[in-house]
Image: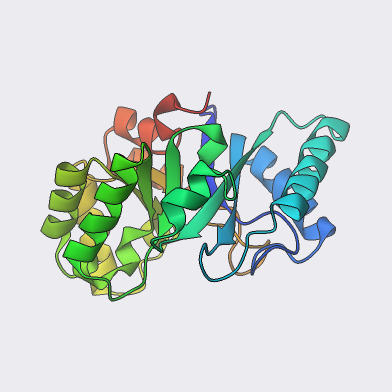
Amino acid sequence: MNQVLTDIHQHLIWGMDDGANSRETMFSMLREAHRQGIKTVVATSHAEPGFQPFDIESYTERLAEAQDFCKSENLDLQVLRGAEIAWTYQVPMALRQGRVPTIGGTDYVLIELWRDISWQAATDMANQLTRAGYCPVLAHPERYLAFLRSPKKALRFRHETGALLQVNANTILHPRNYWERRFTEYMLQEGGVDAVASDAHNCENRPVNLEAAYQWLVLHTDAAYAQELVTFGGELI
């Protein structure tokens, strides 16, 4: 595979959340990302502004460990700052104050919502972040019932707010039910997905799998669209 991949959603920083639980796991995830042809990884540890402080000091130290490991192993892989941020009304302030990181230091922000959020509440979230100067990237919209059961509402949300939608690789490869299969097929057909990412947490049950997702996308969508989905449109190069 010659395609250069960008994975904007990985929980590889050890000991920060339910992702990598040791340095060894983090290093193994980095080796696997490199093997798959991934050139850029965004280390998106969970953050919950307003519920508990994000340990930016530990995050920064362990991110440096990941970056140093790539250099020592001669892995052609850049590891960028980021976070998967649970939406609360404190998020815009936390971003402005630098208490939680954006995607690679850009204005893009990876946001996680709760499963039963309403379409209107999701729209309000996106509009608040946009007014604050950020572009929300909605992590795994296939998990939110308002979008899952009505893909047309997901398209409307994307169109009206300018937010981007990031679908998980595993949802594309192994949809868990009819609703996930219908959602991904419809959204891809309509060009309503902006990024596909692994959301990897470890090397076992939630592994790095972006290469396999890309191969699936090449077979089932337009080749240029498949490339855009796994490179984040070249925004982080």
- On the image, the x and y values in percent for residue 205 come to 60, 69
- In the image, residue 228 sits, relative to residue 64, either above or below, namely above
Residue at horizontal 45%, vertical 33%?
A: 231
Residue at horizontal 34%, vertical 68%?
A: 143
Q: Is residue 37 visible?
A: no
Residue 197 vs residue 182, the one in the foreground: 197
Q: Image check: 73 left or right of 167?
A: right
Residue at horizontal 44%, vertical 25%?
A: 234
Q: Image check: 113 left or right of 86?
A: left
Residue 63 quadrant: top right
Residue 112 quadrant: bottom left
Q: Image check: 113 left or right of 206?
A: left
Q: Image check: 124 left or right of 40?
A: left
- On the image, the x and y values in percent for residue 153 come to 13, 58
Residue at horizontal 55%, vertical 51%?
A: 83
Residue 25 vs residue 211, the one in the foreground: 25
Q: How is the image coloured?
A: rainbow
- On the image, the x and y values in percent for residue 15 come to 75, 64
Q: Is residue 214 visible?
A: yes
- In the image, residue 51 sits, relative to residue 124, either above or below, namely below
Number of numbered discs overlaid on the protein picture: 0
Residue 108 quadrant: top left
Quarter placement of the N terminus: top right
